[in-house]
Each structure stands twice: as structure tokens, then as C-alpha cells.
Image: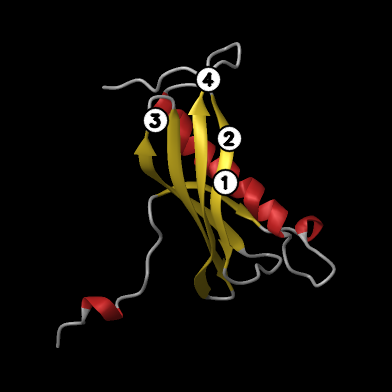
Amino acid sequence: MAKDPAEEEPRPRGELSIQTIAMPADANWNGDIFGGWLVSQMDLAGAVCARGEARGRVATVAIDSMAFLRPVPIGAVVSCYAELLDVGRSSLRICVEVWIRAMGDEAKVTEGTFTFVAIDDEGRTRPVPRE
């Protein structure tokens, strides 16, 4: 019998941008990874995507939304996936999802929408190149 598409396992949006391991130094007093550490990983992943699209330097200008769905344990493999949502004259909106693998379990733990702006060597806004 064919599987109903609605019953399929959810998959990450976008492309794998960065991957790391959650280490004890990044944990809070409860033994879970700090949310701020996750946000910094997401910012890096979004920047990788934005730099490729902008073909050069970018700067984060906003985190438009953020949702923490479940804690991240020490030792989890943390994978950040980035998807380009929109390109303006100089701005790029990127969705970043974080998925973990821990003890045989795979799950989405957070997601957010980041806005980057393309900048030149002096830090001034520049247009995103069009193909």
C-alpha cells in the first residue's frame, strides 16, 4: 500500500549550511545547550547562504522570527539548514532550521527568519548582483 504523503517524515527546508556538535561548554545549568549558542549557529548558517547569493560580504540586520521547539542535549549533532526566501535590492531573507541527531533520534529544534544586507568593503550597503 502506498504511503500517504501527509504521513511522511518531515524533512529540513533548504540546504545543509553548517554542522557541528553541541559541547558541554555551550550548556546551561540544566545541561541543555544555550539558546544564544543556537542563534549564533543559525546566524552563521544564514550568512553562508546569503554570502553565496550576494557574492560577497553580508551583515545580519534582523532576526524577523524565532521559535525554540525543544531543548538540545550535549553531544547532539547540530545541523543548520538555510533556504533563501526573498531577495531585495540589497537585502536577503533566509529561513534557517536547526535539526539534531541524538541517541538515534532526529528532530527539528528551532527555526528562524534572518535578514541580511549585502555590503561592500567599506561596510556600505550594495546591490545584490542579479544574474
Label 2, label 4: how many angstroms apart (C-alpha)?
10 Å
Label 1 crowd bin: few (<14), some (14–19), many (20+), radius 10 Å: some
Label 3, label 2: how many angstroms apart (C-alpha)?
14 Å
The residue wearing badge 3 is: 53
- Please tell me in which quadrant of the rendered image residue 73 appears: bottom right
Q: 14 and 60: which one is in front?
A: 60
Mark on residue 109?
none
The N terminus - image quarter? bottom left
The residue wearing badge 1 is: 63
The C terminus - image quarter? top left
Label 4, label 1: how many angstroms apart (C-alpha)?
18 Å
The residue wearing badge 4 is: 119
Q: Is residue 1 left or right of residue 38?
A: left
Element class at badge 4: loop
Tell me where residue 57 appears, x and y as whole percent: 53, 22
Three-letter amino acid code at the position of disc 3: Glu
Element class at badge 1: strand
Label 4, label 3: how many angstroms apart (C-alpha)?
13 Å
Tell me where residue 61 appears, x and y as whole percent: 58, 35
